[in-house]
Image: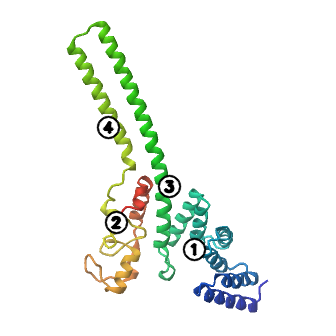
Amino acid sequence: MVTGVGSAMAERLKEDGNNCFKKERFGAAIDAYTEAIALCPNVPTFWTNRALCHKNRKDWTKVEEDCRKAIQLFHNSVKAHYMLGLALLQKKEYTSGVKELQRALDLGRGADPAGYMVEEIWEELSKAKYMEWELLSARRSWELNSLKETCEAALNQQRALDMSRTEEEEETKESSHEAYIAHTERLKSLERVFEKAAEEDKPSEVPDYLCCNITLEIFRDPVISPSGVTYERAAILEHLMKVGKFDPITREKLQPSKLVPNLAIKEAVAAYLEKHVWAYKIGC
């Protein structure tokens, strides 16, 4: 059982660790957090702080260990899920890494401004998702081209057989010309089919309603104002703080407390990204 004295000492050690971290003395910071953990092992912040030091030293195995412990203690730790995701990506466990980053993003939306990490999480998530998409897209493209070549070869082979039969049966030039036109049309139809199949992997413009009027990028954490305009949370909060307490579109008075999450747009963005993964990196 941890006494009040032990808890106070652990907090002082955490502050020592924080000061060392600010000075980039990561080894000393790790030592301080380790002592704090020894005194109070059930405080998730001590584990995530030490994990952050390991992250800066690129010791991803220890990052993973500390983050998993932090999550055991506090399932909704944004930092722990975020850093665990990064550690898993470093191990090339892309599916698990993306899952953890997505969890961190979901938990981070609407968080207290002081600990707001949505943009940082999004940057890493978008890189991972885009890289995953590029690999899958290249494989799909190769498979489509191989299948297309096989189909074209089959049509051309059939055309050659038809021509040999035409010569044997001494059909008219007119019927031979009709056969050639039919063959050409089949090749064109085949081309259209495969062009349509490849469309999903071709980046295009993201629909305007899924993009913020301030950032001109797809929404990460959409909020709606009383006037019905949707903005990216970080962008509208920055506007209200630096420019003035008014809606930049309608010019009506606006307080941060009046902003509420736009769940409909959030779901629409999620559905769009599920189908068009390239949109993680493409602007509006």
Q: CA distance from mark 1 to mark 3?
A: 23 Å
**Callout in the foreground (1, 3):** 3
Instruction: Give the vertical position of 279 relative to 22 (above or below).
Output: above
Q: Secondary structure at mark 2?
A: loop
Q: Which residue is mark 4?
A: 192
Q: Give percent across and percent down for residue 53.
A: 63, 78
Q: CA distance from mark 3 to mark 4?
A: 27 Å
Asked whether disc 3 touches disc 4, contact meaning CB atoms under 8 Å apart, the reply is no
User: In this figure, what is the number of numbered marks?
Assistant: 4
Residue 79 tag number: 1
Quadrant assignment, res 247: bottom left
Colouring: rainbow
Q: Give percent across and percent down for residue 254.
A: 32, 82
Q: CA distance from mark 1 to mark 2?
A: 26 Å
Q: CA distance from mark 3 to mark 2?
A: 23 Å
Crowding at mark 3 (Cα within 10 Å: few <14, some 14-19, many 20+): some
Q: CA distance from mark 4 to mark 1?
A: 48 Å
Q: Give percent across and percent down for residue 137.
A: 45, 49
| Tag 4: amino acid | Arg
| Tag 3: amino acid | Glu
Crowding at mark 4 (Cα within 10 Å: few <14, some 14-19, many 20+): few
Residue 132 tag number: 3
The quarter of the image holding the C terminus is bottom left
